[in-house]
Image (cartoon, grey):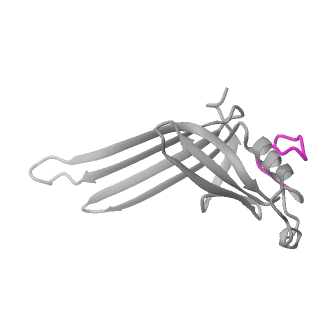
């Protein structure tokens, strides 16, 4: 997590400014990085109390009606080693007034998912880390988080970074 600064909300041990994320000045710096316990500690500290989120909205409309889908997913990484995953998706379909008679109609579907558990950084370099996630329902898995340019990529997806309002 060393290099030049970019504006984001991810606090690292090497910089105490809350709105600064240390990113690589150039990719050449990381050619010879090795997994080290100091990198694990830096990532653990940087992620404690952070929310990673992604929102998406899609829609399509025509004279025959409209379809709208939106989703959000939020990963909260708490300093006590707990995590919370929240996912919400909403889809709706609207139909024109003469569908099946003299009325308009529509219907929708909302889906919410909430998973909690524990997290730990199992390996890390200056530019990426592997997290082990253990859900309270017994499921477990891993995900990679990386700094790529000015972006945080979590499990292959570019994420927004903010302070978690769910962590104590």
Which one is in front, 2 or 53?
2
In the rendered image, which quarter contains the N terminus? Answer: bottom right
Q: Which residues are magenta?
A: 5-18
Can residue 152 be seen in this snapshot?
A: no
Which one is in front, 45 or 6?
45
- Verify whether residue 72 appears in magenta: no
* Name of the residue lying farthest toward the top: 168
Can residue 73 be seen in this snapshot?
A: yes
* Name of the residue lying farthest toward the left: 101
- For residue 72, above or below residue 152: above
Residue 32 image point, x, y percent: 86, 70
Residue depicted at 81% across the width and 45% down the height: 41
- For residue 32, above or below residue 36: below
Quarter-of-image position of residue 142 = bottom right
Residue 168 image point, x, y percent: 67, 26
The secondary structure making up most of the magenta span is: loop
- Verify whether residue 6 appears in magenta: yes
Report the side of 41 relative to 56 (left or right): right
Residue depicted at 51% across the width and 54% down the height: 56
Residue 21 image point, x, y percent: 82, 51
Which one is in front, 42 or 96?
42
Residue depicted at 90% across the width and 47% down the height: 14
Which one is in front, 41 or 150?
41
Report the side of 36 relative to 166 (left or right): right
Residue depicted at 49% across the width and 39% down the height: 115
- For residue 26, above or below residue 138: below
């Amino acid at each position: 997590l060393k290099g030049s600064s970019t504006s984001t909300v991810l606090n690292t041990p090497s910089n105490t400014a809350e709105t600064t994320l240390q990113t690589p000045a150039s990719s050449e710096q990381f050619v010879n990085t090795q997994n080290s316990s100091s990198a694990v500690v830096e990532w653990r500290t940087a992620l404690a109390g952070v929310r990673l989120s992604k929102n998406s909205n899609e829609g399509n409309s025509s004279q025959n009606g409209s379809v709208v889908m939106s989703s959000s997913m939020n990963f909260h990484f708490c300093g006590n080693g707990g995590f919370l995953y929240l996912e919400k998706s909403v889809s709706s379909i609207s139909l024109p007034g003469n569908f099946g008679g003299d009325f308009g109609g529509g219907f929708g579907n909302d889906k919410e998912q909430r998973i909690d558990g524990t997290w730990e950084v199992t390996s890390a370099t200056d530019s990426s880390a592997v997290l082990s996630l253990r859900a309270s329902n017994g499921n477990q898995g891993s995900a990679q988080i990386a700094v790529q340019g000015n972006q945080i990529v979590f499990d292959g997806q570019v994420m927004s970074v903010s302070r978690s309002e769910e962590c104590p």
